[in-house]
Image (tube, helix red, strand yellow):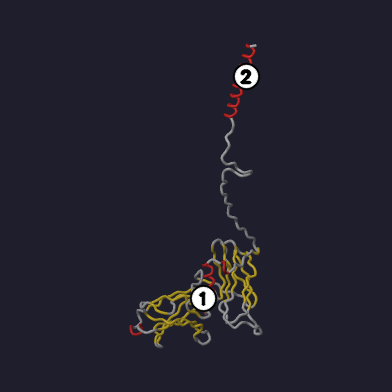
Amino acid sequence: MRKGAKVMKLVGIFFLVSLVLILAISCSVRAPVPDIVPEPNQNSEEEPDIQEPDKEIVLQEGESITFNRPDYSQLPENIKNWLENSSRTFLGHQKEFEGKTYILVTFGEKKTGGYGVDIKDIVFENNSLTAIVELQEPSPSDNVIQAFTYPYDLVSVDFTGFPVVFSAYGDMEYIFELKGVEELKPIVAESEWIKIFGPPPGSVNHAGFTVEGVANVYEGTVSYRLISRGVILLEGFTTAAQGSWMYFSFDIDLSSVEADAKSEDFKLELFSESAKDGSDMFKVVIPLKLK
């Protein structure tokens, strides 16, 4: 009996040693638990940002182009300035900015309400954009507001690179375009068909100054006079255009003007001569004084 008990004791010890070895091996091969477990369908690494290539604009001959009529309050500041500088001039032109082409038609300053500008359609033809514009004028029987108005229409398309031409219908069938400069500067003095950017009324340098502006007048000729106390100190002319707005710029040299005359206030007159009787038309008068 003593021998049998001893055998049983050895078997029990063997069994315990085997169990300990099995548990040790099992723990040594168990996979470690990660600190952060990705959610289902979620990559453990951030995917790179892939940018789509620019879409090529393909236009078909005769195709009507989708355009937007932006809210004035949402316009970029330089587009607002462009509109403001153009508002007093009957003109159609374009401006590209931040991937858009803005198309603007301004009817100029009107003494009453009842005038209207409406860009109805934009068509791609002859490798350019044709803006089809309806122009409206009040009839004598219309009850309109008696105040200065500045009618215009502004639209944009979401691409650039094409020139814009204008086709008008309605009460007028033409729109003047701008030549010699990309856009109008702020106007400091004006008549209906002569717009001056400089000099502004006030002081000018005693050596001379530059006159610049745009005009759309008979034979494209803008005449000028420099007058002091009723005496013409200088006179001459420069060339603009007829049938479109043309930029002009010229210098007035005061070195030949007598010293006594230079001490006085004077004025610059710009005008177009009438084909009928040679009288002054569309006169602009700018009061000046030497510094």
Q: What residue is drawn where x is 61% and y is 74%?
A: 117
On-image quarter of the C terminus: bottom left
Q: Secondary structure at mark 1?
A: loop
Disc 1 residue crowd, few under 14, some 14–19, many 20+, Cα 10 Å: many
Rendered image quadrant of residue 129: bottom right
Q: List the residue tagged with mark 1.
A: 241
For the residues labelled 1 and 2, the Cα–Cα distance comes to 119 Å
The amino acid pointed to by label 2 is Gly
Label 2, on which residue? 12
Look at the numbered discs 1 and 2 and tell me whether their residues touch, using CB distance below 8 Å: no
Judging depth in this view, the residue of 215 and 236 nearest the camera is: 215
Residue 270 position, x and y percent, is 46, 81
Q: Position of residue 118 (x, y in %)?
A: 63, 72
Of residues 102 and 279, the one nearer the viewer is 102
Mark 1 and mark 2 lie on one chain; the one further toward the N terminus is 2
Residue 167: x and y, percent? 62, 71
| Amino acid under disc 1 | Ala
Q: Residue furthest front?
A: 1
Q: Quadrant of the N terminus?
A: top right
- Number of labels in the image equals 2
User: Eyeballing the image, is 20 above or below 232?
Assistant: above
User: In this rendering, would 68 be left or right of 85?
Assistant: right
The x and y percentages for residue 46 are 56, 46
Q: Secondary structure at mark 2?
A: helix
| Res 207 → quadrant | bottom left
Report whether 215 appears left or right of 11: left
Mark 2: give few (<14), some (14-19) or many (20+) Cα within 10 Å: few
Task: Tell which tag, 1 or 2, sits nearer the viewer.
Answer: 2
